Image (spheres, rainbow, N blue to C red):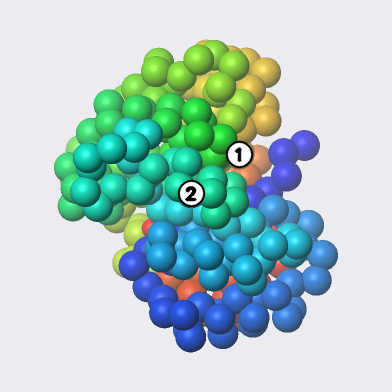
Amino acid sequence: MRRKLIAGNWKMNGSLAANAALLNGIKADLGQPACAVAVCVPAPYFAQCKAALAGTSVAWGGQDLSVHESGAYTGEVSGAMLRDFECTYVVVGHSERRTYHGESNELVAQKTGSAIKAGLTPIVCVGESLAEREAGQTEAVVGAQIDTVLAALDVDDVARIVVAYEPVWAIGTGKTATPEMAQDVHAMLRAKLASRNAAAAESVQILYGGSMKPDNARELLAMPDIDGGLIGGASLKAADFLAIIKAA
Ligand code: PGA
C-alpha cells in the first residue's frame, strides 16, 4: 500500500507573519495524519519552516533547485542549500517554471538527478496544456515529459521520486480534471514507471495537482493510482489544507 502524500505548493506567497499564522493553524489541528504531509515554500522561509516544523509530522521543501552544485550562478539555490535547512522535498519542473523560465524536459530531468544526488525527494511535475488536451496529445506530451526524466535516472533511483500530474488548464483555474480523467493519466504514468523499474512503480507516489480543494479531494483521492495531491491555492488556508489532509 502506498501512503498518500499531501504537499502544499505555496508558490510565491507568504511573509514571516502570514507563514507563522498558517503553520500554527496547521499544527494546531493536524493530529496524527494518516497521510504524509509537506509544504513547499519560497527559499527565504526554509529556516522559518525548520524552526516551526522540526519534530512535527509536516515535512518542508523547496519549489526549484539549480542543476549546479555551487559557483558563479547568481540567483540560483543548490540542492545542498535545501538540505542545509533539512528540506525533504523539492518541486521540479512545475508548469509555471516550464512556461515562465523556459524549462525543457531535459533540464527538468537534470534537476531531478541533482535533487536525488543532494538527498532530496524531487516532486516531478508533468501535465498538458488545454490546447494539447483538445488536440488529443495528452498522452504524447505527458509521456514525453516522464520518459525524459526516467531515461536520465539510474534504474535504482526511480523509487526515489514523486510524480505530480498537473494538467496546466486546471492549475489555479478552479477547473479540475474529473477523477476518471486524472486516473487515466496516472495509470499511464505508472505504466511508464513500470517499464523502467517494475518494483519501483508500485511504491512511487503519483500526486494529482490542479484546483484540488476540500470539496473534490475525496473523490480524486479515491482513485487507485492517485496517491495524494500537490495543492496550490488551498494550501494557503489552514482549514482547507487540513480538510484535504483529512480526506486523504
Ligand atoms: P492550484 O495549484 O491548486 O492552485 O491549482 C496547484 C499547483 O500549481 O501545484
> Which of 168 and 215 lies nearest the eye of the viewer?
168
Q: Which residue is mark 2?
A: 82
Q: Residue furthest right?
A: 32
Q: Quadrant of residue 241?
A: bottom right
Q: Is residue 42 above or below residue 201?
A: below
Q: Which residue is mark 1?
A: 205
Q: Return the disc, 1 or 2, that comes first in the chain's sequence.
A: 2
The amino acid marked with disc number 2 is Leu
Q: Is residue 95 left or right of residue 220?
A: left
Q: Is residue 64 left or right of residue 219?
A: left
Classify mark 1: residues with Cα within 10 Å, few (<14), some (14-19) or many (20+).
many
Q: Is residue 39 visible?
A: yes
Q: Is residue 146 left or right of residue 25?
A: left
CB atoms of marks 1 and 2 within 8 Å: no
Classify mark 2: residues with Cα within 10 Å, few (<14), some (14-19) or many (20+).
many
Q: Quadrant of residue 25?
A: bottom right
Question: Which label sits on residue 173?
Answer: none
Who's the residue at 57% across and 57% down the image?
A: 60
The amino acid marked with disc number 1 is Gln
Judging from the image, what secondary structure is the residue with disc 1 in? loop
Q: Is residue 202 above or below residue 213?
A: above
Q: Is mark 1 within 8 Å of ligand 1?
A: no
